[in-house]
Amino acid sequence: MYSKNDVAKRPPMGWNSYDYYNTMVTEEDVKRNADFMAEHLKMYGWEYVVVDIQWSDPAAGSLCPQVQYVPFTRLCTDEYSRQIPDPVRFPSSKDGKGFAPLAEYCHKKGLKFGIHIMRGIPRQCCHDHAKILGTDVTADQIANPFSVCKWNGDMYGIDCTKKDAHKYYDSVFALYAQWGVDFVKVDDICNTNFYKENPYSAEKEIEMIAAAIEKSGRPMVLSLSPGPAVIEKAWHMEKYANMWRITDDFWDDWRLLKAMFERCEVWQKHVGNGNWPDCDMIPVGKLGYGWNKVSRKTNFTPDEEITMFTLWSIFRSPLILGTELPELDERTLSIIQNEEVLALNASSHGACQVMRNERQTVWASCGEGCPAKGMDVFIALFNLSDEDGEVAVNLSDVPYLNGSGTYRVRDLWNRRDMFPVEGDAELSLSVNKHGAVLLKLSRK
Amino acid sequence: MYSKNDVAKRPPMGWNSYDYYNTMVTEEDVKRNADFMAEHLKMYGWEYVVVDIQWSDPAAGSLCPQVQYVPFTRLCTDEYSRQIPDPVRFPSSKDGKGFAPLAEYCHKKGLKFGIHIMRGIPRQCCHDHAKILGTDVTADQIANPFSVCKWNGDMYGIDCTKKDAHKYYDSVFALYAQWGVDFVKVDDICNTNFYKENPYSAEKEIEMIAAAIEKSGRPMVLSLSPGPAVIEKAWHMEKYANMWRITDDFWDDWRLLKAMFERCEVWQKHVGNGNWPDCDMIPVGKLGYGWNKVSRKTNFTPDEEITMFTLWSIFRSPLILGTELPELDERTLSIIQNEEVLALNASSHGACQVMRNERQTVWASCGEGCPAKGMDVFIALFNLSDEDGEVAVNLSDVPYLNGSGTYRVRDLWNRRDMFPVEGDAELSLSVNKHGAVLLKLSRK
Amino acid sequence: MYSKNDVAKRPPMGWNSYDYYNTMVTEEDVKRNADFMAEHLKMYGWEYVVVDIQWSDPAAGSLCPQVQYVPFTRLCTDEYSRQIPDPVRFPSSKDGKGFAPLAEYCHKKGLKFGIHIMRGIPRQCCHDHAKILGTDVTADQIANPFSVCKWNGDMYGIDCTKKDAHKYYDSVFALYAQWGVDFVKVDDICNTNFYKENPYSAEKEIEMIAAAIEKSGRPMVLSLSPGPAVIEKAWHMEKYANMWRITDDFWDDWRLLKAMFERCEVWQKHVGNGNWPDCDMIPVGKLGYGWNKVSRKTNFTPDEEITMFTLWSIFRSPLILGTELPELDERTLSIIQNEEVLALNASSHGACQVMRNERQTVWASCGEGCPAKGMDVFIALFNLSDEDGEVAVNLSDVPYLNGSGTYRVRDLWNRRDMFPVEGDAELSLSVNKHGAVLLKLSRK
Amino acid sequence: MYSKNDVAKRPPMGWNSYDYYNTMVTEEDVKRNADFMAEHLKMYGWEYVVVDIQWSDPAAGSLCPQVQYVPFTRLCTDEYSRQIPDPVRFPSSKDGKGFAPLAEYCHKKGLKFGIHIMRGIPRQCCHDHAKILGTDVTADQIANPFSVCKWNGDMYGIDCTKKDAHKYYDSVFALYAQWGVDFVKVDDICNTNFYKENPYSAEKEIEMIAAAIEKSGRPMVLSLSPGPAVIEKAWHMEKYANMWRITDDFWDDWRLLKAMFERCEVWQKHVGNGNWPDCDMIPVGKLGYGWNKVSRKTNFTPDEEITMFTLWSIFRSPLILGTELPELDERTLSIIQNEEVLALNASSHGACQVMRNERQTVWASCGEGCPAKGMDVFIALFNLSDEDGEVAVNLSDVPYLNGSGTYRVRDLWNRRDMFPVEGDAELSLSVNKHGAVLLKLSRK
């Protein structure tokens, strides 16, 4: 039997085109990043290659940088109101092939292929009264003219109460299955508090999409955006999706990174078993080319990058790189190739915040296996303050230590063993401002 | 020089198709009501004949009664993105004549002709990238894809910051001037608090429309809907419009009528000189045919009707009948033909609430001329309670009486003289529940 | 080392005076209920006897039923601004003995003793500039004149930023320890969204109280009211308290009971290890004597009572009876003496909602021990609809079943074994409207 | 018959202690300012001397500058729960004389005397169950423990539904009448939107106070604070009070001054006939001594001061100086002694905003008399921008000009005649940034 949780047994790892290419990524760009991933990152677990927003829009970027999304653009669609790739940017998609050739390109390299879509159906198809595959209704009969996204004007929401409305999503995901899509990031669907006054069918559209994926016969990771997801709806997310954004768009800004600790506190009990609350893409290396035709370096300091990767890893967020992969420098590569840290993301459990104040935060989790003696315990110490200093935790507050006995301590970022500690001692380490230390404690 | 205040020197009086015909009024219906008005009401000041919403929509009413406005309907438009009448319902509009023949029909009978429009430009024209007269921009370049009405899906708002955006409104009102339109009710534009989270250009669109009317060369009353208008914006309304709705849709329900007293209290200082805060259409006689293909009688009792006409008259609201005129009965006709009361609406001034509590309200105003001795004073006594009883006012609280001296008292609804009163006496009259008494006091 | 989680290793079970006695419970009333508990309920795990609100108020009830809390009443206090019991209602408290004699009465019967308090310090003490034990500050120097409860006027909140402010709480809980108090229900402190515009120190007062309990040297269960607790603050609750109300006041009304399913869905991952999200007191038997000097029977039907006890048990809410215990009838007694169901409350784990729609809800949890083969699985089927009918669940959706194999099924409320089922079958049972069935599935 | 409108036939002019003395003004300070007013300002119309907040508080200022209002201070009161002056700061008030000697001091100089109070009754009196004059109720029986001000902790609101509640206000204003008080500024009563979630009896307390003044037999100006007053409640304000704050506290900050133009736009139709929407005190000269024991000069530039006085004058706000009068410099004195401008405040009418944009605003009003030919017209041109520049207005947009004919123009601030203008010309003058020009146009 199909279980959506089996599709993402560990947090998805990969690359997404948005942070570097904005709305303008091309087939060549995707291939270049896929090539790099296959050669340098695949062996560490990185596998998803995701084409983000506006791939069906021939006008994408034409009003840049003043306007990100071209109002009333005419998206490329097939006769059944389904978006197809812009053939100029994605030449292999011509002749009805869609993303099948690009997906196959990735698959041949052992990678997986993903795409972004907006919730709903293209507005133009509704006003044109276009057809819906396998039905005798037309687009205007299943859409809601008042269910509009507030930042992108391409789509109308689907009204699930209308006859055969769900069949539109069925037809869309059947097409994606045919293309070989492995991952779908659905946008304008995650934060159910966004449109208080408007009709908003997020929950129902999520349910239609989850059913459409199951009917498609092809496993696809279902990723929901944008955040912040509403914690009261956690049960619903866990029932239907694999990952959901727990913050608004994340970028290379310390204030956003610091705020993520609050979000992870709130969501910490909802991680695991195919459910991966999502801290959003990781903006490292070169960024922003698609905004100004010139890229810039991430604003994060090396210490902030360590903090980011440490939190994402111990919390077990999906790890989706937002950058131009071939331009990554050696230091950044060494971070994303640190298999000791990545193992934590892939297979630890029980991550929880041990303490948090304005100055520091401590998280802990355990390694695989039963929480009996002998299990490894991970401890992350974060210095959130604006000055270098000590970060301290009383080990008896760490839930997975048994309080007594001696532990070996390994510094995972520096890949070196440190001093042994007693399980009821206070552990205090010097940590750079905005930086982090990630430790593994093992029974002696 | 053109002054918008000169276009409506007194509160407009007339008829509107909505309360009876909903979205489905036809040319024949309009003519039938115009005929009746010319014959029976014109001599009392009734003159405007107004075609309300969806006159350009060929599908109007096709989903009735489940759905009032057909989603994604294709409105009739000319090549310049301007709505034109549905030729089936308005046969005389064919061959590019628009509403000119119907306007001329009214004009020949000494009446004036008005139409309803929604703020903005048809959505379909934006997605079709249709032309805008006198410009080289297209509809998609001047509309805002996020500025949508929350109850009617026909239009997108105009973004005044876009090049030549105002020229669309110029072209629209030039067409209306050519047709001979005398009155335009613009909808989805009056209550500026409706769309807190959405882009909403009400103020700027009002300004563009006011300028377009002035440029058109034809005087047109500018009426804004829906309410409740926001009192903080009163100055702006008074600068650009002639009438604006001070409540949400008004219907034949006592609770709505009772609530109107609060709205009139708030707006009382903004009446006069071309500015007419609007209590909305008057639902008397037969109503609602266009909802269920069967009409119903107004729910107002005769006493409630007197209360409504008394308040609308002393407050000087526009008087726009919402009903099928030829079906009015004699009693109702006698109300709307009472020239002593209508004179109050046409030419009194200084209307103000003297007192209001849960049980009763008293209003007063004065007749024409300087507030020196000899001026008539109008006093309206309202019994808001659910029981017949006395309504009392201390005449020394009425601002326009000089406190001493004797006044003759005339009952305007019953057209009869009553007892004389002293200007500092307490006046107490028996008034039916939900009823009103309207008096004129004149110096002996 | 003291751990607040050890104080409540299972959900507290007991009795609270409020639902029957309102603000007016007396020492005799408490003893009568304690006697009954010791004799009939203690052997099933019921142990806490809790005196609810206004025990220090000599005027309590004097304005009943018009006014619940007497404005500006003068509470009984000692010289250090600490409330002491009203000696008229609690005669044994005289001569500075406080609640020590009553606590001892309970302890001798093997029961535990609890009290209710409002967050803060009596207003009268602040205006009198009364002393604070062990400090040289006075009450006015540590209270916040703007931090007032919105429904009870007795107290001002403590301002933790003031010198020695926390010592007031230290002195209060030291006194309670001296009395022998085992359980403290702190009111006006749980829902941190209540006072958006007012200064509100809930979080800081919770922290001061938790520290004061630890310093007191006596373990006390810390219970926070009123709800609904804010899920974003779950981590803080879990760090400092043992139980917190997840709803507003719960009474014997089906709508409130139905709404509890939503609250339990939201909080299900925060149950266990000394943390017990609290569904509030259980209003069965006789209720409400303290409001009108006459008691009434609970409005819950027998089926609704089963639904309530089933949900509270599988969710592992604290079980606090709100009723006059000696007046319980046999049927109700048989419910609260069902040790097969109570075992579920005391020691199951992993309770989760399997599905929920408007008509039915299904929950599941497991028995003690590792989730390996052989573990018992509990399944609760709820019929939320207003008609008797089938409640169905696909057992493959229940997380703790391994999907294959045969299970023995026992009906816990009726204490009888039923048919065996396959682990991947659909289970469908007839359930009364508003009723529930609680099953235990064991490997054959 | 008493009419509250007759008490303030023109906008009150005077001095208030707050802006200079904060909570700490003394009898000597008041006398010093009264002396100056009598000698230098009285002949220009300045007459009110107002003692602002905390005159009954012996601890006032003792926590300054950290805390403005001492929490839980014990106010000086008489046996009937009425505040009396602190005898240390107001020595002449001893022996039950209250403010009578200070009021008499002012009266002898031809000035008027005013005081500030908070809405409600001292909290301490409620907790002490103190007496209320002429009743057998006590303070706790008429106050509402939940009706508390959010910035000053002295009082509880009066609950008008309680027996004899209004008699407390009667007793308070009887005392003020006995003292010879001419002006009462009631605080925490004006903005009815402040306490959305709390019980708030502003409207009812205003009514009780207005009635108490009338019963006292002594005319007193009723001034309400703080703002912004809610425009929907204008009718109520006009019925019961003489002046009400239309903004939050106003200080010497250009942003606040610029924002006042929006407030005046909103309130312009509610000025006159005993009703004076209040732009708040005028912070010129030396300010703030009572905050830091050292005074500072106003932050307003000379141009901003002209803008302020021009707006307050043409709008007809009350003119209440907030400063130490004896320290005013010659330039400022010349502003407040400009009788040509003050005449505008005292007796013009029909002030209205002619236009407003981000860069400039124009106001107009007329002189006394009928709006027939020969009436003077005042025009104020404001440069709101941050650069010197032209401010222009088309005179045909000014409502009180008849459009044609020639006018003499006088510059009121510079007391000089300018060029003549035609009534339909565009008038354009150079105005300093943040500055204003105030003109009088008279028929030639």
Image: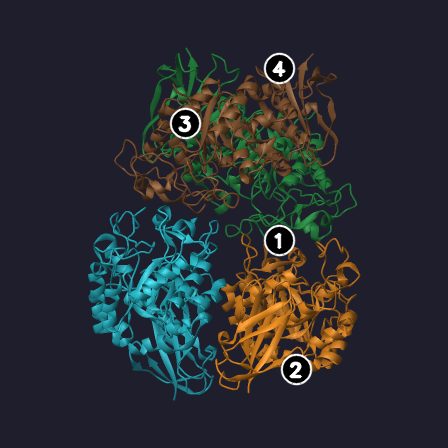
Chain colours: A green, B orange, C brown, D cyan
Residue type at mark 1 is Phe
Q: Residue at x 71, y 65 (%)?
A: B19
Q: Which residue is mark 4?
A: C375
User: Mark 1 or mark 2: which is in front?
Assistant: 2
Marks 3 and 1, Cα distance to the nearest angstrom? 80 Å
Using the image as rendered, state which of residue B132 and residue A368 is in the foreground: A368
User: Mark 1 or mark 4: which is in front?
Assistant: 4
Q: Dot 2, how many residues are within 10 Å of its Cα: few (below 14), some (14-19), or many (20+)?
A: few
Marks 2 and 4, Cα distance to the nearest angstrom? 93 Å
Q: Viewed as shown, does residue D384 lie left or right of C370?
A: left
Whether A369 is drawn above or below D344: the answer is above
Q: Which residue is mark 2?
A: B416
Quadrant assignment for the N terminus of chain D: bottom left
Q: Chain of mark 1?
A: A
Marks 1 and 4, Cα distance to the nearest angstrom? 59 Å
User: Mark 3 or mark 4: which is in front?
Assistant: 3
| Residue D141 visible at all | yes
* Callout 2 touching callout 3 (CB < 8 Å): no
Q: Chain of mark 4?
A: C
SS for tag 1?
A: loop
Q: Which residue is mark 1?
A: A72
Q: Position of residue D73 (x, y in %)?
A: 30, 48
Residue type at mark 3 is Ser
Q: Viewed as shown, does residue D288 lie left or right of B114?
A: left
Q: Dot 1, how many residues are within 10 Å of its Cα: few (below 14), some (14-19), or many (20+)?
A: many
